[in-house]
Amino acid sequence: MTHADPMVVDFPLRKPGEAFPPPRYTTYREQEGLVLSYLPNGNKCWLVTRHEDVRAVFTNPKISSNPDHKGFPNISETMGVPKQEQIPGWFVGMDSPEHDRFRKALIPEFTVRRVRAMRPAIEETVDKLIDELLASGNSADLVADFALPVPSLVISALLGVPPVDRDFFESRTRTLVAIRSSTDQQRDTATKELLRYINRLIDIKSKWPQDDLVSRLLATGTIAPHELSGVLLLLLIAGHETTANNIALGVMTLLQNPQWIGDDRVVEETLRFHSVADIVSLRVAVEDVEIAGQLVRAGEGVIPLVAAANHDEKVFACPHAFDPSRTDRHHVAFGYGMHQCLGQNLVRVEMEIAYRKLFERIPTLRLAVPVEELAFKHDVVLFGLHEMPVQWESS
Amino acid sequence: MRITADNERCIGAGQCVLTAPDVFDQDDDGLVTVLAPEPGAGLTDAVWRAGDLCPARAITVHED
């Protein structure tokens, strides 16, 4: 079966100044079959919005993550999935079985147990950043001064970056994210510097192995050194801005809903409610395939919209309400299927510690501007906040 | 209720461990291992939820 007249919608899907997820997603979910859109390059792509269908796309072997396939829906020149010839080891853009070699080597680094062991170090990192906030006065940009450095410092520790180099690492990763205050050239330079640093780190760890992620990955022998730099860059990029956006948006939401401060269930609901990685998982059909009763031809793009799926009223009661008491945890904020976020349990712990410590230590924290005046990220791939001015009472 | 898990399919997301820690664990490779193949009735809900959350569909719940 196929639908003769699918609804056709404009790309990009997000418009400045409106709520996120876009209210139109409700209409998309109500359509039979799928919604059709055309990317800026003219490529046809299908938008998948219902929870059930999004899960089905993520687990369908006829649907590929590999950007080498014709029709892959890269949403612009710079916002897409790099090819292996550009960044070897970027396994987000691979299918089984190539992908599995990388995933299997990395799984032991991100187990629930391993992440639990990282807690004391994460708490120390968060405490240090709060010390610096408090020492600097009674106002800050919570994005630049807290939300971004937390994951950057956690990842640099995970990768085995020595403490003396962590400020360098943090400043370059921050430049990559600061799309409004950095130029293309500055971001390009920061990427090159990070890659050069990562390569030097790999070189050092291969000569003098220690008990850390890079040394262990090298010891497995399954990932070549030239692939490893792509893998490490991927871990950095995948874990940085995503986590930072969740930290900032979660704090914002807690300030609006203070009755939930101190409740760890906020973590899961923040992930679902804000769904920052709405348009990150890009796919292409490699064979003709039927999704939600819509025939998708080989070579047509497929984009599962995770924010739409996470607000599917058939699955989540009152989906537009922020309600951490929900018992259903089956949101797809981290995707589904074999590419589901490798670092999800680390992100959860970072968010939990960040919220808890911040409100424990700065109970008078408040926004310095009304919510409506906050600079939301409508203009970049990940949803979040560009800046978040906050204040507190001096103690 | 009987549970089997396929650690060839497993991608180590750890959802089962978070959802039903008395039933599932991760081995040294980070892959699923079943601690309680025939869990008591009190764990039924958690086990079903773990099965549904598994992104690799590596968990099978047999109702025999």
Image (cartoon, coloured by chain):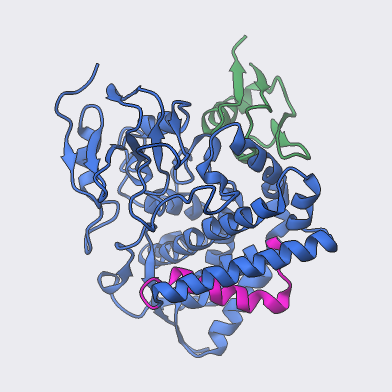
Q: Chain B is drawn in which colour?
A: green
Q: How many marks?
A: 0
Q: Residue, x 37% and y 67% (percent of image)?
A: A385
Q: Is residue A24 above or below residue B9?
A: below
Based on the picture, tell me whether residue A166 belongs to the magenta stretch.
Answer: yes
- Choose between A320 and A185: the one closer to the eye: A185
Q: Nearer the viewer, residue A152 or A165?
A: A165
Q: Where is residue A171 in the image (x, y as percent from the top left)?
A: 55, 77
With respect to residue A218, does A303 lie above or below?
above
Say which residue appears at 54% left-offset and 30% top-offset: B49
Give the side of residue A302 with respect to residue A271, left or right: left
Indicate the quadrant where residue A315 lies.
Answer: top left
Q: In this view, does A205 lie to the left or right of A262?
A: right
* Residues rendered magenta in the picture: A159-181
Relative vertical location of residue A47 with respect to residue A244 in this rendering, above or below:
above
In this orientation, which residue lies closer to the viewer: A379 or A39? A39
When asked about the image quadrant of residue A186, the answer is: bottom left
Q: Where is residue A54 in the image (x, y as percent from the top left)?
A: 38, 34
Asked whether A172 or A385 is in front, the reply is A172
* A136 left or right of B38 in image: left
- Residue B36 coordinates in the image, percent (x, y): 73, 25
Residue at image location 67% in from the left, 54% down from the top: A226
Residue A200: say if magenta. Answer: no
Is residue A61 among what the camera can see?
yes
The chain drawn in blue is: A
In percent of the image, x 69 and y 28: which residue is there?
A: B7
Query: Please, which residue is most extreme toward the front here?
Result: A85
Please state the horizontal and vertical placement of residue A274, each as a whole percent of the image.
38, 54
Q: Main secondary structure of the magenta part?
A: helix
Residue A357 can be seen in this image: no
